[in-house]
Image (cartoon, grey):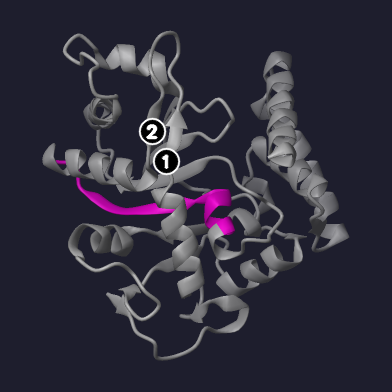
Amino acid sequence: MLSAAAGGPGPGGLERRGGRFSVLTWEQVQRLDQILGEAVPIHGRGNFPTLAVRPRRIVQVVRSRLEKRGVAVHNVRLNGSAASHVLHQDSGLGYKDLDLIFGVDLKSEDVFQLVKDVVMDCLLDFLPEGVNKDKITPMTLKEAYVQKLVKVCNETDRWSLISLSNNSGKNVELKFVDSLRRQFEFSVDSFQIILDSLLLFSECSENPMSENFHPTITGESMYGDFEEAMDHLRNRVIATRNPEEIRGGGLLKYCNLLVRGFKPKSEVDMKALQRYMCSRFFIDFSDIVQKCYGLCRLVVSEDRSQSG
């Protein structure tokens, strides 16, 4: 679907679509295209070379390989702080990780394993010319380039995460989601941008994008009200829904927002939220080493974002 010049943007610089969805403006489409086209270094451990990975390219390769192996990809989305940056460049959030979500059916343990194998196989495509790939195994690639590997499989959540290493903290995070009960912590980090139309345009169009000729790209707020969430982002407001569902890491995100000048929407509501988050933090990070590690990560990421 292509955008035409007809119709101006609605409030907040987004064309109104209603409810939880909104269509990106040309300015936002340009920011998105730039983020997806910039090469991100994936640093190898030991003697393994650094990979230059463009998010658009790795999404296309992973999606194609999954579908060839019989795993349907329903959609691909940009999530989190990078999506917030696309929608409002001066939000004060900044962004580090590139959080890319693939909507897939993870029906069995075999599919979980297949997804991991496909991603490891795709990394071979990004190795520099001259590297002998014949003796490089998936396990070797995992040890060399994967920062974090997570699998969650329970009654409400079925997803896996493969985080590719970047020494400055700008990891490329590939998340494969069948179901996920809670997809955000606060309204300002609740945005997802659906990439399928842009990916299709990149593959099929012989002409470059322009203001009058570009794909229609839709954003969604998992908070539920797109315009309200955008207002919070513009005005640096901390708000959420169903705070009892927020996991332990929400406390770290809350502290990060406070440091960046965000203010609670309601002091009364935030008192209750703080109690929830502190309680959940000590449940989810019951080991003292885990607590220290989580706090150190927050401090390091904040220091990097301030210096960058």
Q: Is 63 situated above or below 50?
A: below
Q: Which residue is mark 1?
A: 39
- Above or below residue 153? Residue 90 is below
Tell me the kind of residue under disc 2.
Ala
Tally of numbered discs: 2
User: Is 250 situated above or below 119?
Assistant: below
Q: Position of residue 301 (x, y in %)?
A: 68, 33
Which residue is the extreme one toward the bottom?
Answer: 6
Instruction: Tell whether position 298 is magenta.
Output: no
**In terms of depth relative to the viewer, which is nearer, 185 or 43?**
43
Relative to 27, is 4 on the left or the right?
left
Q: Residue at x 20, y 9 (%)?
A: 135
Mark 1: give few (<14), some (14-19) or many (20+) Cα within 10 Å.
some
**Quadrant (top left/top right/bottom left/bottom right) for the N terminus:** bottom left
Residue at mark 2: 52
Name the residue: 60% across, 54% down: 189
Q: Nearer the viewer, residue 70 or 68?
A: 68
Estimate the x, y position of residue 302 in percent, counting from the top left. 73, 36
Label 1 SS: loop
Q: Secondary structure at mark 2?
A: strand
What range of the chain is rendered magenta?
70-85
* Front in this rendered view, residue 128 or 214: 128
